[in-house]
Image (cartoon, helix red, strand yellow):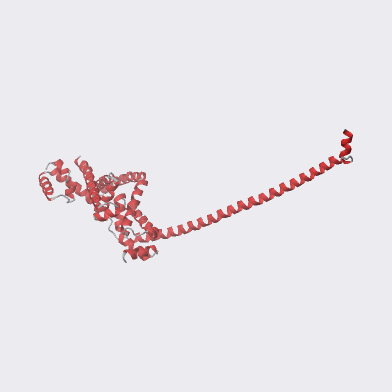
Amino acid sequence: MNEQELIIGIQQNNPLAYKVLVSKYRVSIVNTCMGFVHNNDDAHDLAQEVFLEVFQSAEKFRGDSKLSTWLYRIAVNKSLNFLRSNKKRSLMKSIEQFFKSEKNSTYEIADSEQASAEFDLLNSEKARLLHQALESLPENQRIAFILSKYDDLPYGKIAEIMDVSLASVESLLFRAKKNLQTKLVNFYKK
Amino acid sequence: MKCNEIHNHILFFVEKQLKAEQLQAVELHLQTCSACRQLAEEISQTLDLIHLEKNNSSDDVFFEELMLQQNEKRVQSASTLFLAKSQKTLEVLKIAAVISFGIFMGVLIGNKLQSNQTDFAQSETEFVQELFNNTDLAYESVEEYLAENN
């Protein structure tokens, strides 16, 4: 099924077209959402919302851009909206997770799996640092970095999704890495 | 290169995005500086977490859940459409009822007013008639009246 057939199939509510679209893009869309929200369940829910929106507004799709570009744009917008509207909830969740992970690690240590517990703790600390560093990036730099790192998309595709030039993507990614470098170096130098 | 200069390139070194000349200089420094080597290792491990976060598993439940949600949304939108249509019909009926009531009341008030006016005109004529009958005017002509007064 080529892209045109896929679009027509979705517009005609063809279940096979739905299935092809989901199996083709599910992993990429979940990863994009994951890059923003860093939580499996939220990323999963957001990805479902992305596909639902595509199914429901397929009729409006004019074909000015590729279907994948449209999907990524919806995923980015939905993730950013989710973050904006859930700032307070995320704060509560992270506090909860912090206490949860402390409990878990204590339990694991008591189970004499000290090495694994230490590894988890170190990784969760590093993950927390990475997420904080990513969240502190300006929005455009963050989008470019997530599309590049979480989806391994080429610069050309990122430019298409963000509707900017190739040179802009290069510059955004360079500045994103510089900013991340400063934050990580400052943290690990302590 | 000094440690501070290394810190300005370390993420790009980890990402293998340095030019050959810079790469060589960083590598040379890392051979002799354990602190920078440790830093490079920490940054590399931190960035590697992105790969751990990525989802590569196949998930059949995802599609089933999605289809369930899609069906729910369809039913929901159909019932919303039905509700919207019924609401519209109800509104039209309401407006029609208000207009009919208005017309009915108008007719009722109009009839009442008209009958009042007829009664009033009738009683007024009767009163004038009575007044006229009870005075000399009924028996005296105008010429007689004028001659008498002169």
Percent across and percent down for residue B97 are: 61, 53
**Camera sees residue B117:** yes
Q: Quadrant of residue A73?
A: bottom left
Q: Quadrant of the C terminus of chain A?
A: top left
Residue drawn 42% across the image and 60% down it? B71
Residue drawn 82% across the image and 44% down it? B126
Number of on-image labels: 0
Q: In front here: A166 or B70?
A: A166
Residue drawn 36% across the image and 66% down it? A16
Q: In front here: B122 or A112?
A: B122
Percent across and percent down for residue A142 are: 28, 48
Q: In front here: A178 or B66?
A: A178
Percent across and percent down for residue A115 are: 21, 49
Whether residue B66 sits left or right of residue B106 in the image: it is: left
Q: In front here: B53 or B9?
A: B9
Percent across and percent down for residue B115 are: 74, 48
Q: Quadrant of residue A56?
A: bottom left
**Camera sees residue A114:** no
Residue at the limit of the structure toward the top, as seen here: B150
Q: Quadrant of the N terminus of chain A?
A: bottom left
Q: Quadrant of residue A5?
A: bottom left
Residue drawn 31% across the image and 65% down it? A2
